[in-house]
């Protein structure tokens, strides 16, 4: 009896301690200690603030044209110069952050959530459930999603004016137009990446579920959902977050790429990809036009990577030294 | 287990390789080998059939085409330039785009040609031509020294003379509905029987019926070197039309044998100043001088070497790096962002040449769509466009503000005529819009301006959008569509609700007559009548001009038509007449043709100067 | 295992057919047909009708699709190109696929060649100078998109310094095994910039992953055991740690193939390389249906095979994973 009491006390003490230092709280304090990652985090927060308050900060509108001033070099009137239509490059870059950030967060959220749940369930269940679930993943994985996205983008851009488009399609097209032509980019990137996330999560579960601590948990009668989300999830979250962080720059770059080839944002929505394309045309005479959006894109991606690195170190206790 | 899985890993790699290889290697290589065999067969056959003359020529050829090693050491005079896109075809019957036209011009002779300076129609294959009294029968007398030539490996092989039968075969193949040539509709308005044949529904016809239609076309070989065309009505521009690629002689034996692939290097049979030696699809074309062409001794440039470069900025870089001898058609002129720098640069500015190009850039109003069905609204929008400012601040290529549709250089044009067209007049623009019932733009429904996706068009559209805002206080919505969708949206029979109110479009000359502009584009039954300009008076004028033979009367008819189009009805707002903006290295003497059908065989290179400049 | 491979390949067939059908229907639905324009012009209805008859587009859709599948299965024929009559889709892919493959293989090769050693060096020197340097370079490399790196390299090395050619691809036929070019000076000069532009990001992400994974594995019990047994450090790393640490690296190779497909389209456009991506984008704007479908099919087949390869390698590296 006494021994049992002691055990219970010990368990409670451990729990209390664990609650105090939940993985996330611990990760956060760890993150703050990593100066580079913290700086990156601050950069991203500033970027978010900038994107939200673009209307207040930007000296000009993103589609405000001053033809007489086209190709103006950086100076008093245009801090970072003006593009081929005499639009302020600084303002367009600020507004461009909206596109990149919304793509980053929406796509990452969708992919992480769907992928994790799907992958954990498949990997843990095993057997025929896993088989079927993975067949579905294989099916989707066999699709060159980018190609399908390109074709869908072509379709929706082409039909957007057609009078015969009605009902659900019409709604989708309207949503797409209100998002500057990027709705299907969001959808597609989510589609593209939850599959990868599911595979990683499943792979992790497969190699973890035979491990002692899982077997121990099962042996003492812990329910399946609890095993999954209390014991397995924290252990696989690390690799998954690392992988998702690696993916965020991918989302940003894919959007930029689609916009670069004219299948992303609708002009004059200032996507950095479009701006890079425009800048590339005049790269011989006016390299400043491509420089600013290119730098913005690179810095943003860099910040997400530094933050991701910090997060990885913070989340994965075994990485710490 | 381990060893086995490793083995299967290797197996998987092999499988991928196998698939990869079967996907590319086997598809390409063996076919080429097979075709080469066929080429040899073809050559033997022809050589057997022809008389001794061929052998003589062959001896001559071997000397010119494979010179002795000492001479080979001296590099041939080479012109380096680029193509802006891969020519979709080199088949004269199927050609529809400027790049293909440019190459076809170097390889295939036409009955007639244009003088580079005067733009007069001059003889090429035809030495002269006669017109019947009523102006409906044209007889062309051809020279007898043009030859069909094939390049097999390094050897130039002659395959007989170019005859009137080849001319007739060429036009009939173009028209043949089973060929389904995109430009087959062009002769249908002129040539007797052409429409019936070209537009025939082959599924509903027997072979005999189709043959009867073919025989009904007004193109006949009177003898080996005389060809006769019968027209539906007099057409003074017909000799100009015979310079088009679709009227050029085509080599029947080769086409029969190889089908659509006959234009590949090694198979293609041509008769012009240059021969196709290499065509690396997507990568480059290489043409060499045809030693058997009748004027070969006049041709200085021996090799045309041109990679395909899709980006204008890359083209400009290659020019400045000295990799190419000129920047311009069929490649890229200096990109817009570089224009100021080029003009300011002490060297580049001397290499810059701006010449007219026979094209007009215009904004069309959809005349059937409210409120653009009101001519006052259309006039207000046209008056409000400051064309000169657009040119000075944006285009920078010395383009000319357009007052008419037909551009200068075309017979019957009224470009620059002060009585034709609406000029920039902000006061009148506001007044006219107020007269239409929309003072200060109030009460106008949302107006849409549509362009096809392109940076250049976007720039112009946004500039004009800003002008409309400033002058008329009208906020115009700008939309973009990709080209294929764009043309479907604008097609005359598409529903008006899909169409924009205003759209941008351009037109370039096929031949130098206003008929190609006013009748081909704006007649109420034209497929290019995107503006939905349906004016019986206008139709009557251009129809009358088609059959009229007195040039002075014709010119006046076209003038009247332009006045209806631009002043009375204002169906469109012409913006500017194009220019060709070219950079040419000083060692290249290049004669530029406004129709972009350059005659490279007339160009010369100061070879020593080029070698010095490029460090060869 | 053999059964597994066969089954996977078998299962990919319905995927491919479904994909082709979806693309086929989507293309029919997209406004603007292949013959709605010729160059800069619209064509008269009668000419369009002639063209459609010539290519069998006047037949009912199900018949068109069935004929298409039939010619693929029976003759391996992906159909004619609507825009370039003298070439079939097989010709177009035969010309452009090797070029894209060369670029992709060079880039992935570069990525593995730089990425894995850099990751190992960083991990083995954990929290020491080489680790910091490698990690910083890696994070920098992974952060520069090909879309930025391409134009920057182009501007610096081709435009400003003039060391390397500004455009085009230098491979000359014949290709060994159908796709391997002779490593001529011309080929190498043309290949450097695109390969670096495409491969940098990938090598950096491989380096990061290798490092992270190796660090994790090194802490595992069995590595401690191996060390305790007195094995030399080198043997521990190479024989035990490295192999297991490559598992996550292998998992990203699948997505990486997909990334190469995307990346080549960008790089092909920046450097004017006539690869498959260029034809795909062109095919879309031309509404050249067979070209679009053919290229899509090839991409899908590459994807299926690379995924399969990844899974097999996965099993090979980690015996705990079994397929049956």
Image (cartoon, grey):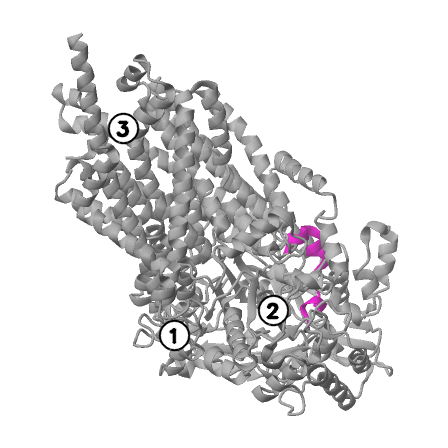
Which residue is the site of mark 3?
Answer: C243
- Marks 1/3: CA distance? 54 Å
Q: Let me know if marks 3 and 2 both belong to one chain.
A: no
Indicate whether B161 appears above or below C214. Answer: below
Chain label for disc 3: C
Chain label for disc 1: A
> Where is the N terminus of chain B found, in terms of image quarters?
top left
Cβ atoms under marks 2 and 1 closer than 8 Å: no
Find the residue positioned furthest to the top: A1
Which residue is the site of mark 1?
Answer: A71
Chain label for disc 2: B
- Marks 2/1: CA distance? 31 Å
Residue B461 lies in quadrant = bottom right
Label disc, if present, on residue B565 of the rendered structure: none
Which residue is the site of mark 2?
Answer: B446
Asked if the stretch drawn in magenta spans residue B253, the answer is: yes
The x and y percentages for residue A196 are 41, 36
The x and y percentages for residue B7 are 38, 23
- Marks 3/2: CA distance? 65 Å
Q: What stretch is highlighted in magenta?
A: B244-262
């Amino acid at each position: 009896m006494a021994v049992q009491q002691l055990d219970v006390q010990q368990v409670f003490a451990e729990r209390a301690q664990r609650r105090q230092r939940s993985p996330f709280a611990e990760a956060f304090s760890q993150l703050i200690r990593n100066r580079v990652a913290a700086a990156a985090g601050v950069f991203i927060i500033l970027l978010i603030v900038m994107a939200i308050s673009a209307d207040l900060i930007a000296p000009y509108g993103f589609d405000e044209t001053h033809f007489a001033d086209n190709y103006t070099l950086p100076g008093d009137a245009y801090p970072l110069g003006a593009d081929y239509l005499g639009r302020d490059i600084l303002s367009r870059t600020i507004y461009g952050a909206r596109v990149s950030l919304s793509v980053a967060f929406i796509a990452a959220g969708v992919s992480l959530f769907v992928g994790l749940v799907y992958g954990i369930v498949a990997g843990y269940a095993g057997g025929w459930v896993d088989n079927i679930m993975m067949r579905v993943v294989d099916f989707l994985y066999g699709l060159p999603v980018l190609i399908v996205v390109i074709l869908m983008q072509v379709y929706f851009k082409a039909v957007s004016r057609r009078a015969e488009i009605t009902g659900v399609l019409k709604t989708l097209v309207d949503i797409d137009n209100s998002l500057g032509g990027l709705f299907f980019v969001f959808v597609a990137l989510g589609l593209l990446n939850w599959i990868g996330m599911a595979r990683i999560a499943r792979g992790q579960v497969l190699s973890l579920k035979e491990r002692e601590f899982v077997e121990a948990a099962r042996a003492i009668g812990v329910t399946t959902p609890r095993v999954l989300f209390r014991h397995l999830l924290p252990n696989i979250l690390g690799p998954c977050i690392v992988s998702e962080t690696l993916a965020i720059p991918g989302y940003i770059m894919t959007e930029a790429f689609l916009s670069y080839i004219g299948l992303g944002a609708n002009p004059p929505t200032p996507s950095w990809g479009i701006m890079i394309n425009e800048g590339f045309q005049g790269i011989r005479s006016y390299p400043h036009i491509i420089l600013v959006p290119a730098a913005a894109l690179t810095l943003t991606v860099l910040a997400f990577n530094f933050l991701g690195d910090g997060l990885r170190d913070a989340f994965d206790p075994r990485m710490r030294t | 287990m381990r060893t086995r899985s490793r083995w299967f890993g290797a197996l998987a790699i092999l499988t991928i390789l196998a698939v990869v290889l079967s996907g590319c290697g086997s598809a390409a290589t063996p076919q080429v080998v097979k075709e080469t065999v066929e080429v040899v067969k073809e050559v033997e056959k022809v050589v057997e059939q022809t008389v001794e003359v061929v052998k003589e020529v062959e001896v001559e050829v071997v000397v010119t085409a494979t010179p002795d090693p000492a001479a080979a050491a001296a590099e041939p005079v080479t012109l380096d330039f680029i193509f802006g896109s891969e020519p979709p075809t080199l088949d004269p019957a199927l050609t529809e785009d400027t790049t293909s036209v440019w190459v076809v011009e170097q390889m295939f002779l036409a009955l007639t040609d244009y003088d580079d300076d005067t733009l007069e129609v001059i003889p090429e294959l035809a030495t002269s031509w006669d017109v019947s009294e009523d102006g409906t029968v044209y007889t062309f007398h051809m020279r007898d020294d043009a030859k069909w030539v094939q390049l097999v490996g390094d050897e130039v092989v002659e395959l007989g003379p170019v005859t009137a039968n080849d001319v007739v075969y060429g036009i009939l193949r173009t028209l043949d509905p089973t060929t389904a040539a995109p430009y087959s509709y062009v002769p249908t308005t002129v040539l007797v029987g052409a429409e019936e044949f070209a537009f025939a529904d082959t599924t509903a016809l027997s072979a005999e019926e189709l043959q009867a239609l073919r025989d009904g076309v007004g193109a006949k070989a009177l003898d080996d070197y005389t060809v006769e065309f019968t027209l539906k009505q007099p057409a003074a521009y017909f000799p100009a039309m015979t310079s088009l690629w679709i009227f050029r002689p085509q080599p029947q034996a080769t086409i029969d044998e190889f089908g659509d692939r006959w234009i590949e290097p090694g198979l293609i049979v041509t008769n012009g100043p240059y021969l196709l030696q290499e065509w690396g699809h997507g990568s480059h074309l290489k043409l060499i001088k045809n030693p058997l062409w009748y004027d070969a001794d006049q041709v200085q440039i021996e090799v045309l070497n041109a990679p395909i470069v899709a980006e204008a900025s890359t083209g400009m870089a290659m020019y400045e790096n000295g990799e190419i001898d000129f920047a311009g058609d069929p490649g890229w002129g200096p990109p817009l962002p570089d224009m100021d720098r080029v003009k300011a640069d002490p060297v580049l500015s001397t290499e810059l040449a701006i010449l007219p190009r026979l094209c007009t850039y215009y904004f069309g109003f959809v005349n059937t769509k409210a409120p653009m069905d009101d001519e006052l609204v259309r006039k207000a929008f046209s008056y409000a466009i400051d064309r000169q400012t657009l040119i000075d601040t944006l285009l920078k290529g010395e383009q000319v503000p357009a007052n008419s549709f037909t551009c200068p250089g075309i017979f019957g044009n009224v470009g620059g005529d002060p009585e034709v067209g609406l000029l920039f007049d902000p006061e009148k623009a506001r007044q006219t819009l107020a007269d239409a019932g929309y003072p200060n733009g109030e009460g106008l429904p949302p107006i849409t301006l549509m362009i096809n996706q392109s940076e250049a068009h976007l720039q112009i559209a946004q500039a004009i959008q800003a002008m409309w805002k400033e002058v008329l206080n009208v906020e115009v919505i700008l939309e973009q569509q990709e080209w294929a969708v764009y043309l479907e949206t604008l097609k005359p029979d598409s529903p008006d609700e899909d169409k924009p109110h205003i759209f941008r479009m351009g037109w370039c000359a096929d031949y130098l007559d206003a008929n190609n502009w006013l009748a081909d584009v704006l007649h109420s039954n034209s497929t290019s009548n995107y503006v939905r300009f349906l004016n019986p008076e206008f139709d009557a004028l251009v129809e009358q001009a088609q059959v009229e033979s007195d040039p002075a009367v014709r010119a006046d008819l076209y003038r009247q038509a332009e006045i209806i189009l631009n002043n009375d009805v204002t169906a469109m707002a012409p913006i500017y007449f194009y220019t060709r903006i070219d950079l040419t290295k000083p060692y290249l003497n290049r004669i530029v043709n406004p129709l972009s059908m350059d005659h490279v065989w007339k160009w010369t290179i100061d070879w020593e100067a080029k070698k010095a400049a490029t460090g060869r | 295992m053999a059964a597994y491979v066969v089954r996977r390949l078998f299962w990919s067939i319905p995927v491919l057919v479904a994909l082709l059908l979806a693309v086929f229907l989507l293309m029919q639905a997209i406004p603007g047909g292949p013959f709605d324009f010729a160059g800069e012009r619209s064509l008269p209805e009668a000419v369009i009708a002639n063209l459609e008859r010539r290519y069998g587009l006047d037949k009912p859709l199900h018949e068109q699709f069935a004929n298409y599948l039939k010619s693929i299965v029976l003759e391996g024929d992906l159909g004619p190109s609507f825009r370039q009559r003298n070439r079939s889709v097989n010709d177009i892919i035969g010309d452009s696929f090797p070029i894209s493959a060369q670029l992709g293989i060079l880039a992935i090769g570069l990525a593995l060649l730089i990425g894995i050693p850099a990751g190992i060096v960083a991990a083995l020197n954990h929290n020491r100078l080489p680790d910091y340097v490698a990690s910083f370079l890696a994070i920098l490399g992974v952060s520069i998109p090909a879309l930025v790196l391409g134009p920057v390299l182009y501007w610096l090395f081709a435009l400003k310094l003039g060391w390397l050619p500004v455009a085009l691809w230098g491979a000359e036929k014949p290709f060994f095994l159908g796709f391997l070019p002779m490593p001529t000076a011309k080929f190498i000069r043309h290949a450097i910039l695109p390969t670096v532009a495409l491969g940098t990001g990938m090598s950096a992400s491989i380096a990061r992953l290798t490092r992270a994974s190796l660090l994790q594995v090194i802490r595992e019990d069995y590595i401690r055991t191996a060390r305790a047994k007195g094995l030399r450090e080198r043997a521990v790393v190479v024989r035990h740690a490295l192999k297991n640490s490559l598992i996550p690296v292998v998992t990203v190779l699948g997505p990486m193939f997909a990334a190469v497909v995307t990346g080549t389209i960008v790089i092909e456009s920046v450097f004017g390389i006539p690869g498959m991506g260029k034809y795909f984008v062109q095919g879309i704007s031309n509404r050249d249906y067979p070209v679009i479908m053919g290229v899509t099919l090839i991409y899908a087949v590459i994807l299926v095979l690379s995924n399969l390869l990844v899974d097999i390698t996965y099993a090979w590296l980690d015996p705990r994973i079994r397929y049956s």
